[in-house]
Amino acid sequence: MRNQILYLNIGIGSETFFNWRNPAATITFNQIDVLNARNYPGKLSYSIHIKKQDYKLVFRKIDPPKGKGKTLIFIVGATPACQYQVMEAFMEFISEQWYEVYSELFLQSSTFGNLFEGFKEIVEDAFKEVPKRYLIKMTTRCSSCAQNFVLYVKKSLIDHAESFPVALVFEHADHALLLYIDSQGHTRGESTVDITG
């Protein structure tokens, strides 16, 4: 995960409160990506996935718990090999930690100097904590291409499911696998599906 998560941005509108770039990243993320995410015309109450040639983006507007603090947009950039579920789990950890540390701070402008510099340590913690506490690792086989895959599923997808099995689509090659996951995080069925867009 450390080599796949490349970028993190936290802010709203034209305000950026925290920006982190993986020191090993060779891909440059720019302000256009941030502005496009923050001005996305759709509803941001769910994670939005954007696939570019050299990287992926996931972003979402996340409200602070109990209304304490300011609603912000969290943006995660990663390599094309990084699974969206990993990116979303990383974002969940980061947003929970952000609101725990800065919940009472009223964020109104970006003139905070180095106030958020210490958050870099929490980003480093995410690389240890997310795989242990936020993800379930599973393997599956695609009968169409006869390949085995290691998949990661957010624990919150299972924990907050309204019913089981939970459906999840894993896109690869020129098709996708529709997985059915039970309450224990095990695959209970799968089928190959076509992709449309």
Image (cartoon, grey):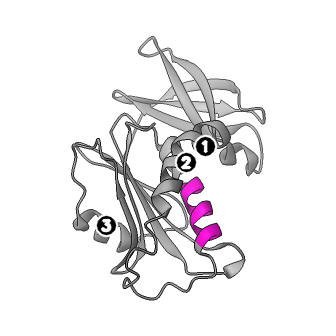
Q: Do the residues labelled 3 and 1 touch (CB within 8 Å)?
A: no
What x and y, as percent, mark residue 126? 54, 47
Give the amino acid at mark 1: Glu
Q: Which three-letter amino acid code belongs to the residue tagged 2?
A: Asp
Residue occupied by mark 1? 129
Disc 2 from disc 3: Cα separation:
24 Å
The residue indicated by pointer 3 is 34
On whether residue 98 falls in the magenta region, the answer is yes
Q: Residues within 10 Å of mark 3 (few under 14, many from 20)?
A: many
Q: In this view, does 39 lie above or below 143?
A: below
Image: 126 above or below 186: below
Binning the other alpha carbons within 10 Å of mark 2 as few (below 14), some (14 to 19) or many (20 upward) gives: few
User: What is the number of the mark on residue 125?
Assistant: 2
The residue stretch that appears in magenta: 91-101
Disc number lying in front (3 or 1): 1
Magenta-colored stretch includes residue 17 = no
Q: Mark 1: which secondary structure?
A: helix
